[in-house]
Image (tube, helix red, strand yellow):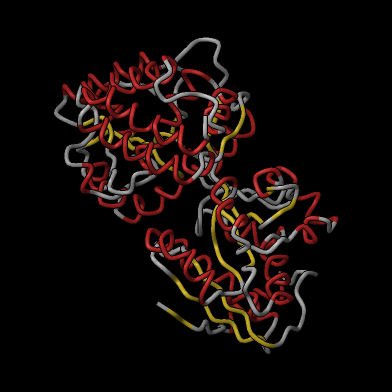
Amino acid sequence: MQTTLKVTLASLATAIALASPASADLTGNLRINLDTSNPAPRATMEAMISRFQALNPKLNITTNVIDREAYKTQIRNFLSADAPDVLTWYAANRMMPYVDAGLFEDVSDLWAEPAIAASLASTKGALTLNGKQWGVPYTYYQIGVYYRKDIYDELGLSEPKDFSEMLANCEAMLASGRKCYTIGTKWLWTAAAWFDYISMRTHGYDYQMSFARGDVKWTDPSVYETFENWGKLVRMGAFVDDHQNKDWQQSLPFVVNGEAGGILLGNFTVAPLRTAGLTDDQLDFHQFPAIKPGVAMAEAAPTDTFHIAANGQNKDNARAFLRYLVSPAEQTIINNGDNLGQIPVNSAAGVSDDKFVQQGFEMLSSNSPGGVAQFFDRDFPAEMAQAAMEGMQEFMLFPDNLDDILERIESVRQDLYQD
């Protein structure tokens, strides 16, 4: 769906009050492609673009909002054939195909500017390939278990301190007639969240990054150990049935209706759960618990990004827009609890007092000594991630197929990394 954004008087007043030195009285055009199709992210991005428009009333801004999953299959085509000026995407290895193909603009010049270099330093590595920077971040968020605290209280359960307690909680949940966790693996990355955490809790962050580089065979005993831990949940029936035919949003009613105790997902799940009627007294969050003693707690905190298309026609306007969206004022607004409900990347931005944003900020700031990864399908090359995630979904349905699954994934690794 394509829309041309209109500016209201209220947004104009807000924009003037929050004017950034990076903005100017720009002219010409600016075309923006967004994958923020879910209601809260879409409204947040459209409001942010309206504020930028208000600062630059002579600029003609057009946005194209594309369904998030469809966007993933369309991005190469539109970057090649009908490139926007600016687009949303993801950090780390998810950038690599478009960097290697010459479809993303090198924006190292922006990262050389003192304000950006200082305030966004924590994510520079995730935006760097071949010694250059290829985009800027606008948000990152925690991943963990969002659970029905009222149901836990009813059953006398507490947040698990380790994997044994997590399994015990699950047994109690199943005994009550509920599933432990909802999930929708129609979009394969939801299964990867479970693999990411169980692997990092079993072997640690350094192992996972080595794995992502292709240094670990999928048939290695360490990988079997990860799946053995995951299989304890799978084999006890912890997950909702028919999850392969549901996306993550279609799986949420199980939590809302009290048919499942929780979900492992990013903080973006909070907005639809609240919209569906859950209160903050009913909903809570906990860090994925430790599995193996001595393995430092590592987290996945995906960083969402904006990029300039190499084939875009309005690169000066695009750079001005990127400067604006990374400013402290904008990052404070777009990440607050009424908007994305996530954590700003700019170190000078304010962190929302929203309950879940604060929990995530505390976890990532104070309780992730092992390191912070992006996410499985961002850390691993795209072809490797796709093959592996297909295998993960199959494992959740047919755990006895594990040998065949891992052998198939390993064959992809050997082809990709040319062992």
Task: Judge by depth and name the residue closer to the eye, 411 or 402.
Answer: 411
The x, y position of residue 101, in whole percent, is 59, 59
Q: In the picture, residue 282 is in which quadrant? A: top left
Residue shown at 27% from the left, 22% from the top: 170
Task: Judge by depth and name the residue closer to the eye, 97 or 300.
Answer: 97
Task: Judge by depth and name the residue closer to the eye, 305 or 333.
Answer: 305
The x, y position of residue 375, in whole percent, is 50, 40
For the view shown, which residue lies furthest in the top direction?
293
Residue shown at 69% from the left, 53% from the top: 349
Look at the picture and state if 417 lies above or below 153: below
Task: Judge by depth and name the residue closer to the eye, 73 or 286.
Answer: 73
Residue shown at 70% from the left, 74% from the top: 315
The x, y position of residue 118, in whole percent, is 81, 49
Q: In the picture, residue 395 is in which quadrant? A: top left
Look at the picture and state if 122 lies above or below 72: above
Look at the picture and state if 319 lies above or below 414: below
For the view shown, which residue lies furthest in the right direction?
114
For the view shown, which residue lies furthest in the left direction?
177
Left or right: where 260 falls relative to 17:
left
The x, y position of residue 66, in whole percent, is 42, 68
Quarter that holds the N terminus = bottom left
